[in-house]
């Protein structure tokens, strides 16, 4: 297949979706497929079509602080990238994807979308997360975009349930983003000298309000073993200084914040003692998966809008979201029960096998093929309709399109869409 990814940011390790897209592209290439990418990121490689960055008035400073980029659509570059593609895959619901969708449809190229950004990610970072009507508005705003696709990729079952709640019409495919085989426990991992004698707790991910690293810092401070705990946050983001100040105020041992390469992250996961995921907004959390792939046992927030709680294999692996006291109690239990933690580590290593990225890519390829096949049927039906209508008189044409309008209206009332242009099939019968 020739697959074109449409992703404003691509390959930037500070952005989870951008990193996921890069890894998917790498596995697809290893499987013999050609991958093209439309992006505003400055990355090298075959098949990269670079677009200018789109600056958003008023909110650009927030976008910059979160390390996010948006691409400015260029119809010539977009057309060049998707011409000859078997399928175009949209990984965001923004300006670039809307324009690319229109061009792909005009060219008759199959296309689908993935849901990788929650409205809550946006509202948390403009400090309006408690304004529920705004989240509802954004889900409905996104719905207009996603309802244009016959198929959507959902990284978690939680997301499929949310989209069903908001009556998104597309078929929804729950497929994990997966973890690359590089992530596995390393018995030769070197434990930094400053960690000697310490109980090391790690959290990985973007430093942002919705990730709630502040809850973890407060929990460590409340632990009975606060004086022996070394807390390490792996990531970067606009609230770094705020977290550093909180750590200076509350923690017995200096907070360590590191932006890590893949190799460094694997070394940290392989030599730490416990992983915590405190985020309250998460579609899957690859970072948590990478941790338990390396044998780290996780303790996860049970946040309503976080799918990461699906990875909790017992009550010990979950805490009340935002409750630092409950998290402190869970941390203390694991410190006091090392044998139980070792048993759980083995359970998580076995559990992790189902999330290997190679298997996830194979599932995505099956969806891609379904979308391609349905697009061929759609094109055939459009051609059949053109030929059929050409044979009709003016009065007959008017009647045909009047009936088609009623047919589409009836589907709309049922919350359905005729993605395959099948009305002609009902007429020919």
Image (cartoon, helix red, strand yellow):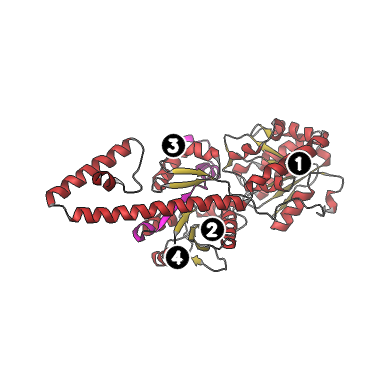
Kindly state the secondary structure of the residue where label 3 is placed: loop
Q: Residues within 10 Å of mark 4 (few under 14, many from 20)?
A: many
The earlier-in-sequence mark between 4 and 1 is 4
Q: Residues within 10 Å of mark 1 (few under 14, many from 20)?
A: some
Residue under circle 4? 81
User: 104 or 350: which is nearer to us?
Assistant: 350
Q: Residues within 10 Å of mark 3 (few under 14, many from 20)?
A: few
- Measured Cα–Cα span from mark 4 to mark 2: 16 Å
The earlier-in-sequence mark between 3 and 1 is 3
Residue at (42, 46) in percent of width and height: 146
Q: Which residues are magenta?
A: 104-132
Residue under circle 3? 166
The earlier-in-sequence mark between 4 and 2 is 2
Residue 309 placement, left or right of 400: right
Where's residue 102, x and y in %?
Answer: 37, 56
The earlier-in-sequence mark between 3 and 2 is 2
| 13 drawn magenta | no
Kindly state the secondary structure of the residue where label 1 is placed: helix
Residue under circle 2? 9
**Nearer to us: label 3 or label 1:** 1
- Measured Cα–Cα span from mark 3 to mark 4: 33 Å
Residue 418 placement, left or right of 217: left
Q: Residue 346, which numbered label?
A: 1
């Amino acid at each position: 297949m020739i697959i074109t990814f449409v992703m404003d940011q691509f390959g930037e390790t500070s952005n989870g979706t951008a990193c996921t897209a890069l890894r998917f592209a790498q596995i697809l290439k290893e499987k013999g497929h050609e991958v093209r990418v439309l992006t505003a990121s400055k990355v090298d490689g075959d098949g990269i079509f670079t677009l200018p960055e789109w600056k958003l008035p008023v909110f650009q400073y927030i976008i910059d602080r979160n390390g996010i980029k948006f691409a400015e659509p260029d119809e010539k570059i977009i057309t060049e990238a998707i011409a000859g593609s078997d399928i175009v895959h949209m990984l965001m619901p923004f300006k670039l994807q809307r324009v690319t969708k229109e061009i792909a449809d005009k060219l008759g190229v199959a296309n689908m979308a993935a849901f990788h950004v929650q409205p809550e990610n946006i509202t948390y970072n403009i400090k309006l997360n408690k304004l529920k009507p705004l989240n509802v508005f954004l889900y409905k705003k996104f719905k207009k975009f996603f309802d244009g696709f016959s198929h959507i990729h959902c990284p978690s079952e939680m997301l499929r349930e949310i989209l069903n709640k908001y009556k998104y019409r597309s078929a929804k495919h729950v497929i994990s983003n997966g973890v690359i085989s590089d992530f596995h426990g390393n018995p030769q991992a070197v434990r930094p000298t400053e960690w000697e004698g310490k109980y090391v707790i790690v959290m990985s991910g973007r430093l942002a309000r919705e990730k709630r690293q502040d809850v973890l810092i407060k929990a460590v401070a409340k632990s009975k073993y606060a004086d022996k705990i070394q807390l390490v946050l792996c990531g970067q983001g606009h609230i770094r200084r705020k977290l550093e100040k909180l750590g200076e105020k509350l923690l017995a041992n200096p907070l360590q914040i590191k932006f890590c390469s893949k190799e460094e992250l694997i070394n940290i996961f392989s030599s730490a003692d416990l992983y915590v995921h405190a985020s309250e907004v998460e579609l899957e959390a690859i970072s948590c998966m990478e941790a338990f792939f390396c044998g780290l046992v996780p303790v996860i927030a049970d946040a309503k809008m976080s799918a990461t709680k699906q990875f909790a294999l017992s009550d010990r692996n979950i805490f009340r979201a935002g409750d630092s006291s409950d998290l402190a109690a869970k941390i203390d239990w694991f410190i006091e029960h090392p044998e139980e933690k070792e048993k759980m580590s083995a359970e998580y290593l076995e559990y992790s096998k189902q999330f290997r990225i190679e298997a996830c890519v194979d599932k995505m390829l099956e969806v891609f093929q379904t979308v391609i096949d349905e697009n061929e049927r759609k094109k055939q039906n459009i051609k059949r309709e053109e030929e059929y209508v050409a044979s009709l008189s003016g009065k007959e044409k008017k009647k045909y399109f009047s009936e088609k309008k009623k047919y589409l209206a009836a589907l709309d009332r049922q919350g359905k869409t005729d993605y395959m242009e099948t009305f002609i099939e009902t007429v020919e019968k």
